[in-house]
Amino acid sequence: MTNEELWQAVLAQIQLNISPANFATWFKDTKIISQKNGVILISTPNSFAREWLEQKYNKIIFKVLHNSDEELKEVKYEVGKSGLKILKKIPVSFQKDGQLEFQEFKIDKETNLNPRYTFENFIVGPFNELAQAASFAVAKNPGQVYNPLFIYGGVGLGKTHLLQAIGNEIIKNFPQKKVKYIPTEKFVSEVINSIKNHQMEKFKSAYQIVDTIIIDDVQFLTGKEKTQEEFFYTFNSLYEKNKQIILSSDRPPKAIPALAERLRSRFEGGMIADISFPDLETRMAILKAKCQERKIGLSEEILEYIASTIQRNIRELEGALNILIVYQKLNNSLPDLTMAKSLLKKIISSPNNIISAKKIIQAVMEFYDLKEKDLISTSRKREIVKPRQVAMYLLREELKSSFPFIGRKFGGKDHTTAIHAYEKISKEIEKNENLIEEINIIRQRVLSG
Ligand code: ADP
Ligand code: MG
């Protein structure tokens, strides 16, 4: 069990014993950072939380952890170095706390591929059929069919899984081929480091010997000029040598203008496939497959409850299962439906409870790669005006906030500005499909974030 799964399970149990307000206040953004020699170290977002956990909750935390690990002698607490922000920005939590998610699997250092992700354990339904078929074709004939292959879709819907499955399959079929998977965030930091250490040549040549390059989450290139240049250089030189290029993003290429414009001609020879939301039947199929893999026999009733409540994120479906699996391990019995519902309360809450103005603004900032000060500024630049209007629109649509409230949220603007923004966006989405798509992505992030 990974640290993350264990902690999720502990939280689920603790939540049954304390008030929701206390839970939200003291356990938010906590996690296990290490388990060693009978000592579990827990990180907290600030020193208040550390003191409270130490003084008020240590006993219960210890008890629940001890149930799963009899060797446990002590639980320690410390204030975490990286705040929540960093964690949030990295969708697959790959580099900074990669141990959490992938601890149990060996990631190949050369290729960055995780053997856990294969086509065999990727469930296909109407929502991801095209993306899967295109990926499979590319894995069978790298560089020959769709080049580049561009896959896009929302958070937790299987993009990374598919990309990694392609890589693993290519290595299986063509062991001599060099495959490299890299999350864009890591590509960005490699570029920055190479520039800093005057090692650009080394960086470039490392990519020149690759046969298949897989770059995940290219939306993170937005706004990073120098990295974009290196990206295009790498992309073009590999493309010209007929090397296979595979990209993923949370939005279609045309929603990343810097990318779409420079690579327009390339995309014509390639394939763009999206992954949308899984239907109920596929959600059930995914849950059943994962139960089998994890050897847990949850009742049909519980699976139906999970599948009908978590609709838009496969990672969350897995998260729900993990909580129940850990419950079963700790208590040596399967939960019944009532128990399952109360254990899952934390991840399954009604959307109205989780949406807040702060979350909307945060999601808009992240999507358009802006800072909060940009949004509340009086800047009339188009790159800022549009996101600001989108944020105002969402506050109105999702929270029914009053226009004066919205104006105040954005640096004390007049309510007429908020009305104008709302009307402008409402009108524009009637004719602009890209905008609808952008807004849907942001909405989904607010709901899943
Ligand atoms: P994304 O990269 O789109 O955010 P991931 O590929 O990380 O999403 O998927 C989230 C989790 O859901 C992973 O653990 C992945 O294995 C699982 N998953 C996603 N789609 C499927 C699928 N079609 N079948 C089985 N598991 C899936
Ligand atoms: Mg991903």
Image: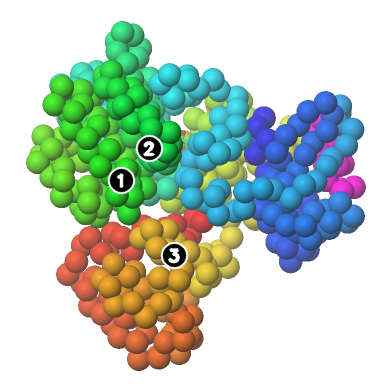
Spatial CA distance of label 2 from label 1 is 10 Å
The kind of residue tagged 1 is Lys
Q: Which residue is mark 2?
A: 195
Q: Which residue is mark 3?
A: 371
Mark 1: give few (<14), some (14-19) or many (20+) Cα within 10 Å: few
* Callout 3 secondary element: loop
The kind of residue tagged 3 is Lys
Which is more N-terminal, label 1 or label 3?
1
* Picture quadrant of residue 422: bottom left
Give the answer, above or below, for where 50 lies relative to 424.
above
Give the answer, above or below, for where 421 lies relative to 443.
below
Magenta range:
57-69
Residue drawn at 22 percent across, 73 percent down = 428
**Mark number for residue 226?**
1
Instruction: Find out whether the residues at labels 2 and 1 contact each other: C-beta distance under 8 Å.
Output: yes
Residue 60 within the magenta-colored segment of the rendering: yes
Question: Closer to the camera: disc 3 or disc 1?
Answer: 1
Residue drawn at 62 percent across, 53 percent down = 83
Spatial CA distance of label 3 from label 2 is 25 Å
